[in-house]
Image (cartoon, grey):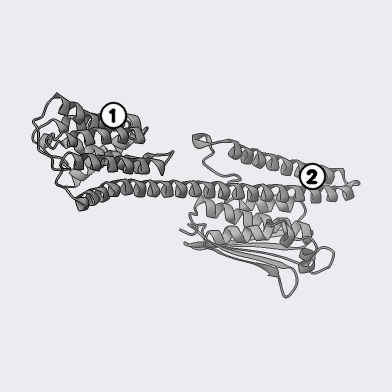
Amino acid sequence: MAAATSRLRRLSRWWGARPTATRDREFALVFTVLSFAEPLSRVGARFGDLPTHDASMASVLLTLGQTLPLAVRTRWPAVCLAVAGTSFAVHECLGYPAAFGSLGLYIALYSVGAHQERLRRAVPLAATGGYLVFNVALYALGSPDGLTDFLVYYLVLAAMWGLGVLVRGRRAHEAERRRLSAQAAIDAERGRLARELHDVVTHHVTAMVVQAGAAQYLTGSPDRIGEALDAINGTGRRALAELRFLLGVLEATGESAPKERTPLPGRVPDLVEQTRAGGQPIELVEDGEQPDMDIGARLTAYRVVQESLTNAVKYAAGRPTLVRLTHAPDWTDIEVTTAQAADGAPVSAALRHGGPHVSGGRGLTGLRERVEMLGGEFAAGPRPEGGFRVHARIPTEGAA
């Protein structure tokens, strides 16, 4: 049973992958062959109950008129219905025996409901008018069927058209769902890249500004000026490398897109060392073994530390900063604390005058969004004893 189901699925995928026009032609061909194959050739719809005449070449041509138009049922559904419907009406009015090909009328009606793009209201109205003419002709030819029979058959035909409309609606709904999903993915990626650009530019440019400012006071120490310039040069190179990668992500599509994000998460010690080289006293404490985090969680952890150190350089330059990483199997805990601002004002006051809370929706606000999107926890605020504290707990596998 499982093997048969698997074969049917493979056959369905193979059939669905073929061009629509090819599928329609092949379907029409198979349907035509079945219409003349015993015993199916004698099974079909009869309407009007007129005296039966023997089959002839005319009946064969009329049967073909009900099957062959199905080859264009998707491309020109109205034409398909017009030819199949006319052939069916003439076939019944001439009293030919029931034929399997008469089912082509039902398929044509379904196709109009499912595939007709233009004149979607006019085609059913025209078909209804044709059905009325057909009924008048049957009545004039002596059909014993009454008004009830005509109405019931009309409802059957209308149901086939309605089924096509239902399928079309579901198909349109699914297409819209896929479009919205794709748009949401694009918007999310744009937001991610915007946050990445903010993090890269803010962190590195801030470090370079602080380092350049410090170098102004080292004119009497050529060796230390050289160290400061080396630090600025290294920071600039790292910023350029990260910006080049992000621009590559923006330009690349499909298989050419990079498989990993940069900077590679997990380099928190390098980040701390880089900031320390710029003159900020930083202590890194790491407890536990780093878990195997997915790329989104690792990158977010990196950005939490990076943004926190950027704010420390901005608003508490020269003040002791502690970065504490605590690892557990299911999460990583990040805590970055700084002393009060370099000018002696509380860090909270510095934040109110241009700190990360007013960074255009980025900064700490962006970090909170990123952490909570992964199902983690985020808090940032002044410490009672002075200074500022950023805390984040990030699940190793994000929200999943």
Q: Residue at x 18, y 36 (%)?
A: 93
Q: Residue at x 85, y 50 (%)?
A: 213
In the picture as drawn, the residue positioned furthest to the bottom comes out as: 384
Q: How far across and down, in percent of the image, does residue 252 sit?
A: 56, 36
Q: Which residue is mark 1?
A: 25
Give left or right: position of 23 versus 5: right
Q: Quadrant of the C terminus?
A: bottom left
Whether residue 281 is visible to the viewer of this picture, yes or no, is no
Q: Residue 325 shows which numbered tag?
A: none
Give left or right: position of 231 versus 141: right
Report the amino acid beneath label 1. Answer: Arg
Give left or right: position of 298 versus 89: right
| Category of crowding for the residue at label 1, using alpha-carbon neighbours closer than 10 angstroms: few (below 14), some (14–19), many (at least 20) | some
As helix, strand or loop, the secondary structure at mark 2 comes to: helix
Q: How far across and down, in percent of the image, does residue 276 sit?
A: 72, 53
Report the amino acid beneath label 2. Answer: Glu
Question: Observer-nearest residue: 366 or 51?
Answer: 51
Mark-to-mark CA distance, 2 and 1: 77 Å
Q: Which residue is mark 2?
A: 227
Front tag of 2 and 1: 1
Question: Observer-nearest residue: 128 or 79?
Answer: 128
Relative to 251, residue 299 above or below: below
Question: Observer-nearest residue: 64 or 376?
Answer: 64
Q: Residue at x 45, y 50 (%)?
A: 177
Relative to 96, residue 380 above or below: below
Q: Quadrant of residue 280?
A: bottom right
Q: Residue at x 62, y 47 (%)?
A: 193
Q: How far across and down, in percent of the image, does residue 234 sit?
A: 72, 42
